[in-house]
Image (cartoon, rainbow, N blue to C red):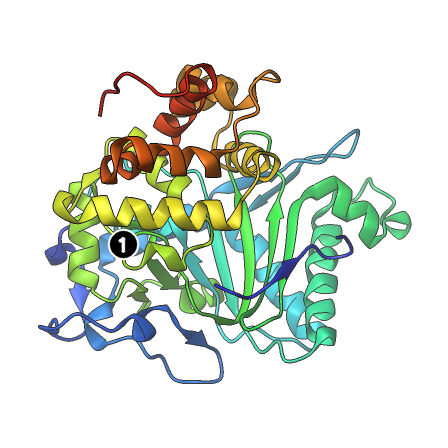
Amino acid sequence: MKSTSSHYGASSSASSISSTTSSSSSAPTVSSVVTFDVRQASKLPASATAVLTASQIERLRSVLSETVEIHGRGNFPTLDVQLHELIICVREKLFKVGCPAGHVKMNGGAASYVLATEDSFPYSDLDLIFPMSLETDEDFDKVRAAVFQALVELMPSTINKDKICAETLKDIYIRKMVKVSDGDRWSLFSLHNDFGRCIELKFVDTMRRQFEFSVDSFQITLDELLDDIDDNEPVLRVESMYGDMSEALRHLNERLIDTRHPEEIRGGGLLKYCHLLIRGFRLAAPQRWRKLQAYMCSRFFIDFPDLGSQQMKLMAYLDNHFGNEIERLEFFGPRLKCLLSPGIRVDLSVLISRLTSVWGDLGCTLVTCGECLLLANMLSQRSRPTGASG
């Protein structure tokens, strides 16, 4: 993805879900899967859409009724709010500033939890998408203002809200703000949570790539339930940006990893791939993954070419997805120290070259995140490793 980004103000099985049409026999093209434009009709094939079952709607209702915490830094209070109230508040503020959302969609781990057959399917991220028109820089500013206004409204009445400005809120309750306006047009606000319960608000005009892996490709349109949380018979639709709903659901319930064109994903999806492996997911088609791993690694080192940017990306992923140090160690194990140790200054882009020269294509298969860190330490001590375990 060639679009540039900047920080604001700073540098279940298929039978468990009822498909709206029969599945297509041919796989969708990449362009039909990854392109979204609020000003155009959906380009997804009919086989990529479905309607939620009654049991899935009840699970969704429970997610929307969950109380989420937005932690404030310093002495500022934690904002405790039900998820559907947060969404409604943001939606209302968007309307008031003149930048209304066409819909509201749930994405990521929470959407996967709603669709999975297992009641115990774990998730930590709450991703919300607000499709809208973002034609000008002024539109981006309006979205920013709407988010900040929503946060102020959600603050306790004991706070003197008249003295709260946007810059203060940015430092207190926002973990990350991103604005993309070159090619793709979207913005993201990641709300702060100390326990890795990542809440992301994404405002999208155009986005060429909207998923990393099939198991996180689901988008559930929430409007009917938001308008009446107690509605007994809402019709709620879900899309798989992967392009094949039945296949994506099979991957989700069998805990399989699959994707298309990982070189299109910022960072190649490398860290999410490792995260899925740690959670016990398996490769859907192992024979394809040597090449896919190579693409993932290549894109990772294109986007994060030096040790500093790689370290920042790793730490940001840990902050967003892991609630405590024990969980972080389970993700990286002792290998994390290989990269973060002050005495180690191995450029991981050089590591790729050296692995390839020593082991050929096998080098690429070794470079999952944890293995990469382990090998970085090994290569920093020896010019040529004597062996490695796959």
Q: Residue at image x 44%, y 24%?
A: 376
Q: Along the line of sight, which residue is nearer the eye, 374 or 148?
A: 374
Residue 327 visible somewhere in the drawing = yes
Locate residue 115, reporting x and y percent. Answer: 26, 51
Q: Position of residue 280 (x, y in %)?
A: 24, 31
Q: Is residue 103 left or right of residue 27?
A: right
How many numbered marks have been drawn onto this rendered protein structure? Answer: 1
Picture layout, residue 53 above or below residue 64? below
The answer to whether residue 83 is left or right of residue 146 is left
* Residue in view at x 40 percent, y 48 percent: 298
The image quadrant of residue 368 is: top left
Viewport quadrant of the C terminus: top left
* Outermost residue, right side: 163
Residue 229 seen anywhere in this rendered image of the structure:
no
Q: Amino acid at mark 1?
A: Thr
* 46, 83: nearer the viewer: 46
Q: Position of residue 190 (x, y in %)?
A: 60, 48
Residue 362 lies in quadrant:
top left
Provide the secondary structure element on which disc 1 rests. loop
Q: Residues within 10 Å of mark 1 (few under 14, many from 20)?
A: some
Splitting the image into 4 quarters, where does residue 179 fall? bottom right
Instruction: Determine whether 330 is above or below 117 in the image.
Output: above
Pick whichever, 164 or 390, lies toward us: 390
Q: Residue at x 55, y 66 (%)?
A: 3
Q: Which residue is mark 1?
A: 259
Residue located farthest toward the bottom when viewing the structure as drawn: 40
